[in-house]
Image (cartoon, helix red, strand yellow):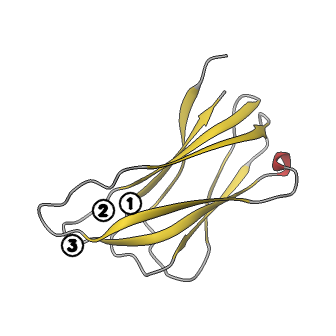
Amino acid sequence: MTQWKELMFSSVIGTASVETALTSFTPTKSGRLVGVEIVLAGAAATSLMETGYIKMACPTFGGVDSYFGFSGNGLRTAPATPVPPAQHKVDLPVSAGTPIKGFIFWNVTATTPAVYVYGIFN
């Protein structure tokens, strides 16, 4: 079966200690979510990005929320080095038309973060 990658969520929110809802992602095909990739890219040379997680909730996940951690590289001073993507292997069923709700949580308030969450589907 062919795998494909889609942008599920993106965020520029950096509030600490609060789960913040992201725009829901709705799969266009039924299949399986087999991987999650989280990319952090500061929007400024002075961006601050520490640790946190992405939470996903969907009825097709069997009533259990899924958590995916990520780590930044602290204060990004010039020249900023890229943060390696956080990659997670999973095996979760998805159904076309059934939304997946996303949430982001930061342990430390982030400054000018840009977060992209990709789903790898099968």
The disc, 2 or 1, on the residue closer to the chain's N-terminal end is 2
Residue 20 rendering spot, x and y as whole percentages: 59, 72
Helix, strand or loop for disc 3: loop
Residue at the image position 48 percent from the left and 61 percent from the top? 70
Which quadrant: the C terminus?
A: top right
Check residue 114 in the rendering and tell me which mark sits there, or answer none: 1
Q: What residue does disc 3 label?
A: 46
Mark 1 touches mark 3? (CB < 8 Å) = no
Spatial distance from mark 2 to mark 1, Cα to Cα?
Answer: 5 Å
The disc, 1 or 3, on the residue closer to the chain's N-terminal end is 3
Q: Relative to residue 62, is residue 84 drawn left or right?
A: left
Which kind of residue does numbered mark 1 sit on? Answer: Ala
Pick the front one: 67 or 22: 67
| Residue positioned most to the right | 62
Residue 86 rendering spot, x and y as whole percentages: 47, 52
Which quadrant: the N terminus?
A: top right
Q: Is residue 106 above or below residue 121?
A: below
Which kind of residue does numbered mark 2 sit on? Answer: Gly
Check residue 98 in the rendering and tell me which mark sits there, or answer none: none
Pick the front one: 9 or 4: 4
Helix, strand or loop for disc 1: loop
Residue at the image position 71 percent from the left and 50 percent from the top? 100
Mark 2 touches mark 1? (CB < 8 Å) = yes
Residue 60 rendering spot, x and y as whole percentages: 84, 45
Q: Relative to residue 60, is residue 45 drawn left or right?
A: left
Spatial distance from mark 2 to mark 3, Cα to Cα?
Answer: 8 Å
Q: What residue does disc 2 label?
A: 42
Label 2, residues with CA under 10 Å away: few <14, some 14-19, many ≥20: many
Q: Is residue 105 above or below residue 122?
A: below
